[in-house]
Amino acid sequence: MNLTELNRVATAMVVSGKGILAADESSGTIKKRFDAIGVESTEGNRRDYREMLFRSKEAMSQYISGVILYDETIWQDAKDGTPLVKLIEQSGAIPGIKVDEGTQGLPMCPGETITVGLDKLAERLKKYYERGARFAKWRAVIDIGSGIPSMTAISVNAHALARYAALCQAAQIVPIVEPEVLMDGDHDIDRCYEVTSRVLNKTFQELRVQRVALEGMVLKPNMAISGKKCPKQASVEEVAEKTIRLLKACVPAAVPGIAFLSGGQSDEEATAHLNAMHKLGPLPWGLTFSYGRALQAAPQKAWSGRPENVTAGQNAFSHRARMNGLASKGEWQSSLEKKAA
Ligand code: 5MM
């Protein structure tokens, strides 16, 4: 393992002014997104959509540091025969790959899941590296509800995240470690804080036990935020203050960067929260976005599967990428959104 190189890639992934495009929707998830805009989820349509994003010159060259791909996408070619991975590289962004294989019910723990995909992972990583991937992603899912999460779910998911991260580093691939505490319930921000704190502490404990080099990884956490169904929604300032307090308490400064998931926040909320956190600096790590829905909802709607809408889709993507790029420096203002509308 070349730790200097892993650290170089991890640092580039979280460089100020840029962030990561999470375009790694599995076939089931992209179908849901396409259903919402009335587009059939065929292999060709999935390729055309992602090619549109990766050919968005402004977004990709100025605001996107890396792209997380799904297995199907990393092997796909653009319409003109150029591998999609090459389009990403040519834009200056780093290609990455989601390597988990989704979740399964966790035995003895009703309502909880374990993320799977460790079998043959070393072999898969080797092929992904040869294809151009320089980082990977694995997402653990922790739900908050009555009596959950159990320590069992937190513990086994942290163990799997660390197993994955160690395998990635051995294959010279930077692991994005994503322990997502879902924001689906009616819990308040303090409950999210408490659960996320337990999850992060356990995750870093496992990472240390399994000798993962913290300098060669990126953390992808949720923010400390109210559950979607909570009657009392925390303000932007409260989310920012509690998230930074939480991360400072749990994430060692040796980690080069943190790139948030959006988790179901609206586009503008996700941007406003990241921006507000940067007002609380200086921070010990790079802090940016690794959004899926909060970057793609607008371009998906603008595109709607029509070739004549490609430019509109690219403009919508470039706008969101620029807004989040500014937020990653604390330079975003809501008036910039209104001007664009
Ligand atoms: C883009 O969505 C990713 C893939 O999800 P599935 O494996 O469930 O299809 C997802 O892991 C994503 O990378 C993160 O959750 C962040 O995306 P959001 O939409 O929460 O910003």
Image (cartoon, grey):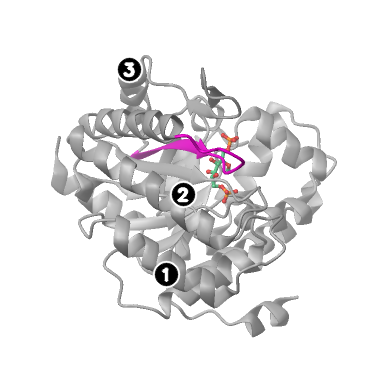
Q: Nearer the viewer, mark 3 or mark 2?
A: 2
The residue sitting at 36% across, 28% down in the picture is 160
Indicate the position of residue 232 as horizontal and vertical percent values. 68, 67
Q: Amino acid at mark 1?
A: Gly
Query: Callout 3: 10 Å neighbours few (<14), some, many (20+)?
Result: few
Query: Callout 2: 10 Å neighbours few (<14), some, many (20+)?
Result: many
Query: Callout 1: 10 Å neighbours few (<14), some, many (20+)?
Result: many
Picture quarter with ligand 1: top right
Q: Which mark is residue 195?
A: 2
Q: Which quadrant of the view contains residue 41?
A: top right
Q: Amino acid at mark 3?
A: Glu
The residue indicated by pointer 3 is: 123
Badge 2 vs badge 1, beta-carbon distance below 8 Å: no
The residue indicated by pointer 1 is: 17
Indicate the position of residue 81 as horizontal and vertical percent values. 55, 33
Which residues lie in the magenta part? 134-150
Q: Cα distance, mark 1 to mark 3? A: 34 Å
Q: Nearer the viewer, mark 2 or mark 1?
A: 2
